[in-house]
Image: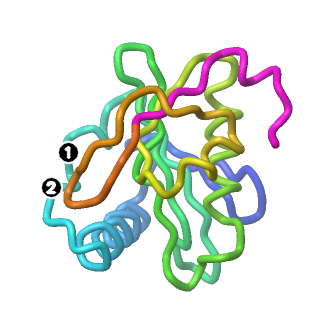
Amino acid sequence: MSSELQDDLRIASFAELDTGTLYQILRLRSAVFVVEQNCVYLDLDGLDPEPGTRHLWIERASEIRAYVRILDIDGEPRIGRVVTAPAGRGGGLAGRLIAEAVRIIGDRPSVLHAQAHLRNYYAKFGYQQNGPEYIEDGIPHIPMIRNATAMRQPAR
């Protein structure tokens, strides 16, 4: 099963996820992205079970409070599905997960597509906007990249 990185931060491949954990992850993503943000889209995009995909989450009181996945698209890491449950917001959980994702990715360039209002948040982890703003599911987004040199620069 998943390895425990800290007392409540876990990482697993799809094959290592038990059904209860997978259910909680998919429920959280659906509750926030589809219901709360009112975005009707197919969250189950076929990428979760890919061999290079890693699932990171923080669990407290047997409940998943925050989640991130790292995809490996043609050798390029991509962070996505960053989500925090309402009960976990404001406690830095997403930041812990992003920091761990960046640690796992290491000195390789990586990308993410962020909601535009989170530009400065992701900049703290070395990501910079690398394309024009666009609308996805009615929400302004921006493409961002973290170059290999960002790993050698201290976070601000």
Q: Give the quarter of the image for residue 142.
A: top left
Q: Position of residue 141 (x, y in %)?
A: 36, 48
Classed neighbour count for the residue bearing mark 1: other residues with Cα under 10 Å, few (<14), some (14–19), many (≥20):
few
140 or 122: nearer the eye? Answer: 140
Q: Label 2: few (<14), some or many (≥20) within 10 Å?
A: few
Work out whether residue 129 or residue 66 is closer to the camera in this orientation and state it.
129
Q: Is residue 45 left or right of residue 12?
A: left
Pointers 1 and 2 in contact (C-beta within 8 Å): yes
Query: Taking 113 as reference, is 46 left or right?
Result: left
* Residue highlighted by disc 2: 42
Q: In the image, is 85 to the left or to the right of 140?
A: right
Q: Which residue is mark 1?
A: 45
Residue 156 percent location from the top left of the image: 82, 43
| Vertical arrangement, residue 76 with respect to residue 33, above or below | above
Asked if residue 152 is among those painted magenta in the image, a careful observer would answer: yes
Q: Residue furthest front?
A: 132
Residue type at mark 1 is Asp
> Judging from the image, what secondary structure is the residue with disc 1 in?
loop
Residue 9: image location, x then y, percent:
67, 58
- Which segment is the magenta one? 143-156
Q: Measured along the vertical axis of the image, is residue 140 above or below residue 25?
A: above
Quarter of the view holding residue 72: top left
The answer to whether any part of residue 60 appears in the image is yes
Taking the spot 46% from the left edge, 26% from the top edge, the residue there is 130
